Amino acid sequence: MENYQSSLDAAFHALADPTRRAVVSRLTKGPASVKELAEPFSMGLPAFMKHLGILEKDGLIRSEKVGRIRTCRVNTEGLAAAESWLAEQRRLWQARTDRLADYVETQMTRSIDDAD
């Protein structure tokens, strides 16, 4: 459980920043070089590399260098902890809204029956 919590904390830490979320979003479409990833952002390469470092340290991306080109790709296993937690939260809230809808429907039916 502690390892799961650690993975979850790392994933949400990495995804807390909009630049890093944008990078992960871009990488879900396929691998990209650092140059391609940095292009849409108005920051220096050293600052951008810090973002990539956090994403890699927290396990959301992987990178490899071939020659002078570093290519990044999404690490789907790293995203699994966040995805699993979010899916569980979605199930809980869906169950709650279903119960609320049932309650409201029951109350409406009672109101109609009481009016007759």
Image (cartoon, grey):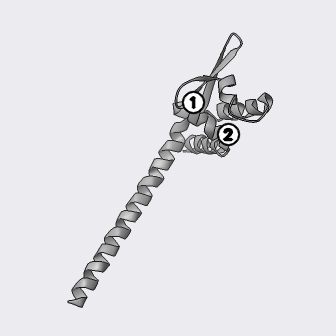
CA distance for labels 2 and 1: 12 Å
At 44% from the left and 59% from the top, the residue drawn is 93
- What percent of the width, then of the height, locates residue 19? 67, 39
Q: In this view, does 22 lie above or below 27?
A: below
- What percent of the width, then of the height, locates residue 78? 56, 34
Q: In this view, does 84 lie above or below 44?
A: below
At 28% from the left and 84% from the top, the residue drawn is 111
Task: Report the side of 23 relative to 107 (left or right).
Answer: right
Q: Quick one: which residue is furthest to the bottom in this view?
A: 115
**Label of residue 19 in the image:** 2
Query: Looking at numbered disc 1 in the image, what kind of residue is underneath it?
Result: Leu
Residue occupied by mark 1: 27
Q: Bin the neighbour count of mark 2 within 10 Å (Cα to Cα): few under 14, some 14-19, many 20 and up.
A: some
Q: In which quarter of the image is residue 38?
A: top right
Q: Earlier in the sequence, mark 2 or mark 1?
A: 2
- Which image quarter is the N terminus in? top right
